[in-house]
């Protein structure tokens, strides 16, 4: 169950990383749309100056400016603004934003193709609009984008005559051939985009699976196989991180072990001894949290208690001792293990080695009494403030 939960967390973490990449691409998608609108306005303005000084102008200059510069640029700008607010909206999901940007880009391409249909190469804008959707690896989005591109191109070419000098495909064989070639190219781009999505998905799934396996392998190296708690390597990593970044909140380091654990193995066998270790680790995890418990070796466990005062840590140790005494081991009812705890409060001046030695010294004093708690005292370098359980809880 725990491994499944960890696997789910790893998958979600990696998917979040992939989604952040898609968010970056979506922003780039929008910026390309904005660039297209801006550069088209500049090109249309430049062409206006050129055409105004030539003899190819077949209408008045104000009408030309209104029809071929102001109208298409204004409508394209409106679609651009809609895309901008869609991206900024927190009510829309990432997928809806992808659809809005992709489909509005197709409509912008339709505007420019309709206004300047005399320039056949403008159809290439549709190809760009289709291919930009492949990064999202969404078959439906790419298909809808491609279909909308083909429909808008066909409607614009066959039924809309924004430019009265436009040559109809029905009255000119070359124009008809060019139109059919353009449709074939866009269909080809759509097919290539679908194939690209297929392999993009396979690549993403393979990368995700390998990354999860790599992360699970790394995580497995940090867990103790018997108890499921963190192991010595994880403890060293945490202590190294603790040394690099001084915590601002109180922290207690503790070492605990089972009293006379060797006699448990000798009297009841190693299988019962292992069961005792598992139960002890469960008690520690229940009271101190799974992320705080490390099996250092044998029956010795280390606890890193963040945001915890020494008094709170002592109280938790007392409860863990009482809980351990109440455990019934099936088939070995006479087994009533006890545990000793050595605690020390972290000080910024302490190195991790000194911190460990202080807790170890406190544990050594606790085991002199057995089933005790000792706290390292810096002022006198002595051990004190220990706890003795009530008589009815004392080991027999």
Image: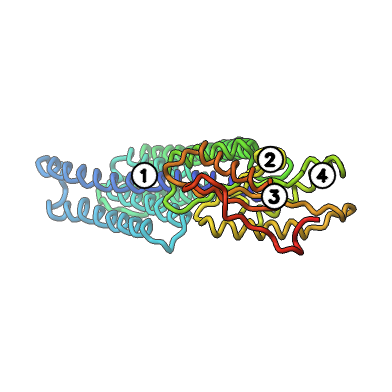
Mark linked to residue 84: none
Residue for point 17% across, 42% down: 47
Asked whether the beta carbons under mark 2 and mark 3 sit within 8 Å of each other, the answer is no
Most extreme residue toward the left is 53
Q: Residue 264 carries which label?
A: 4
Is the residue marked by circle 4 packed among few (<14), some (14-19), or many (20+) residues within 10 Å? some
| Residue 250 rendering spot, x and y as whole percentages | 47, 53
Residue sitting nearer the eye, 365 or 19: 365
- Is residue 86 visible from the viewing direction of this image? yes
Q: Nearer the viewer, mark 4 or mark 1?
A: 4
Look at the image and tell me in which quarter the C terminus lies: bottom right
Whether pointer 3 and pointer 4 mark residues with C-beta atoms closer than 8 Å, the reply is: no
Q: Where is residue 59 in the image (x, y as percent from the top left)?
A: 15, 51
Residue 374 picture location, percent across and down: 60, 51
Give the structural element (helix, strand or loop) at label 2: loop
- 346 or 126, which is in the foreground? 346
> Which sits earlier in the primary sequence, circle 2 or circle 1?
1
Counting every numbered tag in the picture gives 4
Using a 10 Å C-alpha cutoff, classify the residue at mark 1 as few (fewer than 14 neighbours), some (14 to 19) or many (20 or more).
Answer: few
How far apart are labels 1 and 3 at the CA level? 68 Å
Q: What label does residue 369 carry, if any?
A: 3
Nearest to viewer (mark 4 / mark 2): 4
Q: Which residue is painted at 57% across and 52% down in the image?
A: 384
Can residue 180 be seen here? The reply is no
- How far apart are labels 4 and 2 at the CA level? 21 Å
* Foreground: disc 1 or disc 3: 3
């Amino acid at each position: 169950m725990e491994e499944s939960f960890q696997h789910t967390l790893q998958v979600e973490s990696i998917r979040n990383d992939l989604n952040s990449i898609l968010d970056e691409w979506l922003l780039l998608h929008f910026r390309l749309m904005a660039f297209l609108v801006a550069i088209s306005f500049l090109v249309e303005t430049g062409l206006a100056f050129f055409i105004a000084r030539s003899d190819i102008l077949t209408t008045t200059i104000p009408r030309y400016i209104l029809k071929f510069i102001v109208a298409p640029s204004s409508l394209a700008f409106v679609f651009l603004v809609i895309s901008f607010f869609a991206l900024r909206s927190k009510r829309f999901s990432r997928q809806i934003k992808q659809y809005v940007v992709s489909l509005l880009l197709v409509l912008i391409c339709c505007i420019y193709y309709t206004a300047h249909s005399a320039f056949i190469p403008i159809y290439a804008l549709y190809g760009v609009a289709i291919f930009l959707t492949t990064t999202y690896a969404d078959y439906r989005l790419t298909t809808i984008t491609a279909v909308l591109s083909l429909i808008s191109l066909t409607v614009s070419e066959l039924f809309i005559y924004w430019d009265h000098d436009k040559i109809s495909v029905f009255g000119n064989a070359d124009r008809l051939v060019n139109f059919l070639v353009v449709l074939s190219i866009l269909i080809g781009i759509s097919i290539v985009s679908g194939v690209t999505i297929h392999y993009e998905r396979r690549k993403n799934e393979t990368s995700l699976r390998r990354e999860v396996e790599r992360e699970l392998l790394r995580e497995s190296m940090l867990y103790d196989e018997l108890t499921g708690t963190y192991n010595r390597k994880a403890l060293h990593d945490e202590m190294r991180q603790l040394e690099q970044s001084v915590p601002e909140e109180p922290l207690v380091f503790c070492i605990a072990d089972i009293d006379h654990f060797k006699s448990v193995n000798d009297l009841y066998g190693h299988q019962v001894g292992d069961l005792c270790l598992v139960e002890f680790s469960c008690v520690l995890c229940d009271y101190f949290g799974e992320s705080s418990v490390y099996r250092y070796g044998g029956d010795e466990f280390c606890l890193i208690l963040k945001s915890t005062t020494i008094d709170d840590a002592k109280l938790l140790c007392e409860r863990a001792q009482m809980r351990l005494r109440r455990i019934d081991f099936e088939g070995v009812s006479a087994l009533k293990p006890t545990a000793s705890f050595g605690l020390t409060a972290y000080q910024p001046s302490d190195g991790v080695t000194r911190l460990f030695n202080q807790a170890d010294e406190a544990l050594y004093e606790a085991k002199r009494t057995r089933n005790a708690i000792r706290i390292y005292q810096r002022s006198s370098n002595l051990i004190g403030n220990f706890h003795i359980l009530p008589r009815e809880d004392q080991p027999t």
